[in-house]
Amino acid sequence: HKVAPHPLGDGLCAWIRPVWNTDTRDAQDCMGLDNSMLLVFADLCLQIAGFVGLPIACIMGPLHRIFGQNSTNRDYLTWWGMGNIVHEDRSRMCEYLFWVHAVLVWYVVMMTQYLIEKKHREFFAERIHWLHRMEAPRCTTVMVKGIPTAYRTDAKLKAFFVKLFSEKSIRSAYVVKDVRNITLLRQQLGAVDKRIAAAQHSIKADSKPFLPFLSMEDPYSQLTHLKQERAELKTRIMQGQAEICERYKHSLAHDTSLQKGSSEPNHWLLQSASGTLS
């Protein structure tokens, strides 16, 4: 609605309280799911930095500085890193520091994985909430890509999803065919029809018009040539339509993509109004 979920004040720091009180649902209502999830991702990065970065900086940094044996290095910044530990030193404390690092590595892995999976579960909950609040037909429509050839008809595609879900869950299914060539031919046919109408109008007016698209001067010859061109275009359009119908008709009998041992990829890609589902 292009309205902030909480009103902002006039002070210099008046934005802090409204921003702090804005949760994911409020942000989702104002700017959509994708933008609100971007804020959630930024929050995840902050959590990882807090649970992983702070222990490393506050615990391992002082340990490297206090028990490191390379304090003679004038690069003071390296005193807080692992490089401050002298590898030739065989003291017990140096050995313990390496064991602390081994434990810390697993802490970083497990904590990061836990935070990511937690946000992932929250994302699915927010996504379902957003889909339930979406208006039809956007909330009830998915685009399917990578359909096997045996299912590339309206009836077969609907039967597949009815079997997968239920009869009540599927309202309709349509297979979009590639008709770009036919569309181009129809545009050419429309242009020829306009030229035929112009030639017929010139003949009725009993004049000798100048038609820049042809070199002939006789209007009757021009009209005959245009009619022949229109007939050829109609024939090519009918042939293209027949090829598309035959292609999808015979694909049902000759397709083997679903049989065992087939080398053709069998991957269905469902895309909803907000992105890929599976």
Image (cartoon, grey):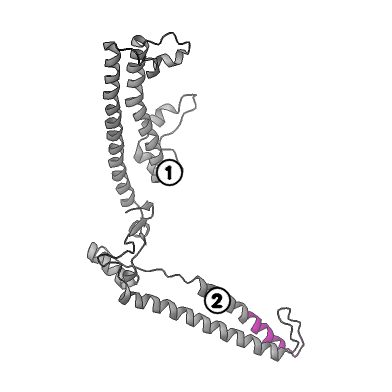
Using the image, determine if residue 58 lies above or below residue 133: above
**Quadrant of the image for the N terminus?**
top left
Element under disc 1: helix
Residue 257 placed where, x, y %? 31, 67
Q: Amino acid at mark 1?
A: Met
Q: x, y (%) of residue 222?
A: 69, 87
* Residue plotted at (30% across, 22% down): 101
Question: Residues under labels 2 and 1: Cα distance?
Answer: 43 Å
Mark 2 or mark 1: name the one nearer the start of the chain: 1
Which tag is nearer the camera, tag 2 or tag 1? 2
Residue 195 forms part of the magenta stretch: yes
Label 1 belongs to which residue? 31
Nearest the camera: 45 or 12? 45
Q: Position of residue 255 (x, y in %)?
A: 32, 72
In this rendering, the answer to whether 111 lies above or below 256 is above
| Viewport quadrant of the C terminus | bottom left
| Residue at horizontal 45 percent and vertical 28 percent from the top | 15
Q: Are marks 2 and 1 in contact (CB under 8 Å)?
A: no
The boundaries of the magenta stretch are 193-211
The amino acid at mark 2 is Leu
Q: Please give the count of numbered marks on the rendered protein.
A: 2
- The numbered disc on residue 185 is 2
User: In terms of secondary structure, where does tag 2 sit?
Assistant: helix
How crowded pointer 2 is (Cα within 10 Å; few <14, some 14-19, many 20+) is rated as some
Q: With 203 as the anchor, is 250 left or right in this view?
A: left
Is residue 204 visible in this depiction of the protein? no
18 in relation to 247, above or below? above
